[in-house]
Image: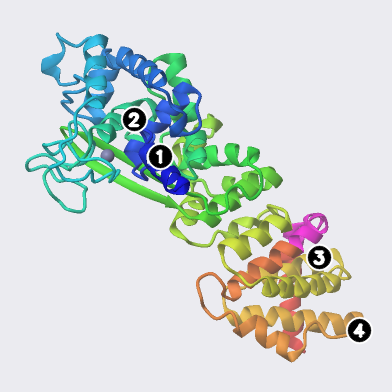
Amino acid sequence: MKEIEKVKRSEEYSPPFVWTGHPFTDAGLVALLLLSGKGKPEELTEKDVENAVEFASKLYARKEWSSGYIHAMMLPNSGILMANPSMSKKRTPEEIKKNLLALLSEEEDPNAPVCEICGRKHSRQKPVYRSDFPLVGTGGVPNYFPSGRDGANICSHCLFLAQMMPLAAYRLSRVLIIHAYPYELMLEFHREAINDVKKSELASVARDFKRPENFLFKKLGEIGRKLEAGKLSGASITLYYFVNNNQGQEIDVIYIPNPILRFVALASQHDSAGWARIVSMGWNRGCAKRLAKKQEEIEKSCENDVYHRLLDGESVLHYFIDPQSRRANSSWRLLSFYCSEVLGLDENALEFVKRVADRIVETVEKLPDNKLSRRIRELERAEKLYQFEGFFIRIEKDRQELGIPGALMGFDDFARILTSYGEDLNVSWKTVKNLLLFRIYEKLHDRLMEASPEGAEEEEVEEEFEEGEE
Ligand SMILES: [Zn+2]
């Protein structure tokens, strides 16, 4: 009996706000929580909500927020927030506060359909349109809801939360919401926005970043540095980059897969210099050149191929090495994490390639500087499979000439390294080539740099001639 009562009581308790998984209402909830210094929706008190409403209303009544931001980018002609230009004369913090609190005391109509966002309450009697909830459409304007209908069935509480969203959002050339799970992570990602609003009384401009993905990777690095290991297992992040105004409605949804999150967090915790070198190789060259005098502008404004490839599920392995300065950009540990967790390369395969690389190093380090440099250049320049094969044959010859006992590889190993990785995008022989070069640079960078490139160039011509004579 008692058990039943307990269940009943817990069913009765229903906090006014819950996480819904919807980016816009969750962002509003983030604003409420951060303003109140709370971590969970059930910790919010009535007083917290009222304080937050008061804070918001004062800002929303100002022109910079009303016509310059809410009407211009998020909720065109909003009636609730009084951003409709016709309401400018009557607009006061008190009126806006009244509208917001009225939403929370709105009575539910049991005949209305259930809210499409939280599924907990009945929606308002009339569908909600895009002036009060971004991107749901009005009249002939397209909307982004799957039903494709005009407006959406949304309850007054979800509608209320959407009105708090402007406080937590980042204002780039569109509005950016970083929706993250677990929700503690979302709080972390939006803390800066609320702090900026408190300081400047203006919406956060995300440190003047022009590209949302650049801002995200920057923040992810900062947050990742503080996170305990394991905190990101199962985490996910999606960016919603949108604009909703009288000129149009647009949204880009950028999903960041979990392995990428963990990789960037690990990189910033354990090898931030290496990660910085990898990123620095990805900047769009023209843009970086143009902004060379303003280094910090590069990371805000230029496109980065490393970011794009990570988000598009393409390999960034070649950015782990810098053939120009014959250097490995990161630690082997970061490379190994990237290969196994992001590329999905079998760990045994990685160890196998490492062993082969170490035997190559064991061989070539016995060569004189010039010959060493030339030998590695053959690997660097291998663009076709037969050139790659040729490299191994020469190393095998070097071993014999140097009298190193044991072959570089047995027949099975040779076949495995050349053929079993096929032409799969991520795990082809080119992957193996990059991994070999990584290890070789890691071990032999100093010696490789000692040999002058011009000298090696001449030597190369000579050797080809020699070999032709044989
Ligand atoms: Zn709802």
As rendered, which of 338 and 199 lies closer to the eye? 199
Residue at horizontal 19%, vertical 11%? 91
Q: Earlier in the sequence, mark 1 or mark 2?
A: 1
Mark 1, Cα crowd under 10 Å, few <14 / some 14-19 / many 20+, is few
Would residue 207 be found to the left or right of residue 154 on screen? right
Residue 326 in sight = no
Q: Earlier in the sequence, mark 3 or mark 1?
A: 1
Residue 104, x across and y down, in percent: 26, 26
Front disc: 1 or 2: 1
Mark 4, Cα crowd under 10 Å, few <14 / some 14-19 / many 20+, is few
Mark 3: which secondary structure?
A: helix
Rendered image: mark on residue 405: 4
> Which residue bears the numbered disc 3?
370
Q: Earlier in the sequence, mark 4 or mark 1?
A: 1
> Which residue bears the numbered disc 1?
9
Q: Which residues, given as a range, are shown in magenta?
A: 440-455
As rendered, which of 434 and 338 lies closer to the eye? 338
> Which residue bears the numbered disc 2?
165
Q: Quarter-wise, where is residue 169 in the image?
A: top left
